[in-house]
Amino acid sequence: MALANAPGAGVADDKVVYAFVPKLIRYYLDQEATLPNVPSYLCMFDDDRRYVLDHLDELVVKPANESGGYGMLIGPRSTAAERAAFAERIEADPRNYMAQPTLALSTAPTLFDGAPEPRHVDLRPFILSGPETHVTMGGLTRVALIKDSLVVNSSQGGGSKDTWIVDTEED
């Protein structure tokens, strides 16, 4: 018998904890992370907060304690009034906000009303850990069902697509 999702496993998906993952890897494994983190700015730190407030038009700002894409500011798609309101929220409760650069998500053809249209997607691979680590032949592709949306979370109108991995190696 095995436990697929151990209690507390979701802590690594926390927006604030995510920013510390490279330091956690260094501390516990005495090595650098294999993959780099997306730059993350925690507004509870003065330097990070100043950077975020000076670059609101470039960043995605997320509440630390919300889930599913709620309460976000997507800077490049926001108005000056929305950024001003967000700056007030950040100043009032800096511990509750973090920011990251706006990523250029890939698109995939998605069928709408019988015709394909591009929609933003992200891929969540599945990795099995044990005596050996194995990346599965597939994963969860999340898709933004709202045209031009960068939010792929299902609670914000996102969906999922089949993910196919084509093996081109000869056995």
Image (cartoon, rainbow, N blue to C red):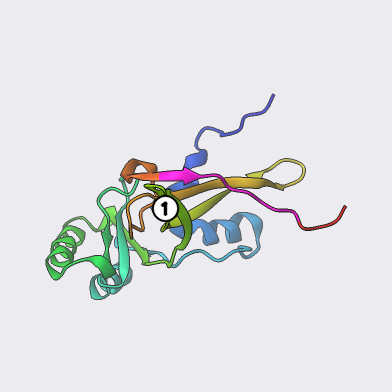
State the quadrant of the N terminus. top right
Q: Is residue 167 left or right of residue 33?
A: right
Residue 11 in view: no
Residue 141 in view: yes
The disc labelled 1 sits on which kind of residue?
A: Ala
| Residue located at (62% from left, 29% from top) | 3
Quarter of image, res 4: top right
Helix, strand or loop at mark 1: strand
Q: Which of the pair 36/49 is nearer the observer? A: 36
Kindly give the residue lying farthest to the front in the view shown: 114
Q: Is residue 15 left or right of residue 6?
A: left
Q: Residue 140: image x %, image y %?
A: 54, 45
Magenta segment, which residues?
Answer: 159-167
Q: Is residue 121 above or below residue 130?
A: below
* Main SS of residues in magenta: loop
| Residue located at (40% from left, 52% from top) | 15
Mark 1 neighbour class, 10 Å CA radius: few under 14, some 14 to 19, many 20 or more: few
Q: Which of the pair 93/156 is nearer the observer? A: 156
Q: Is residue 45 left or right of residue 125?
A: left
Q: Is residue 67 above or below residue 3?
A: below
Q: Residue 17: image x %, image y %?
A: 44, 52
Q: Residue 93: image x %, image y %?
A: 20, 55
Residue indicated by mark 1:
115
Q: Which of the pair 144/112 is nearer the observer? A: 112
Kindly give the residue lying farthest to the top in the view shown: 1
Q: Is residue 100 left or right of residue 166?
A: left
Q: Is residue 165 magenta?
A: yes
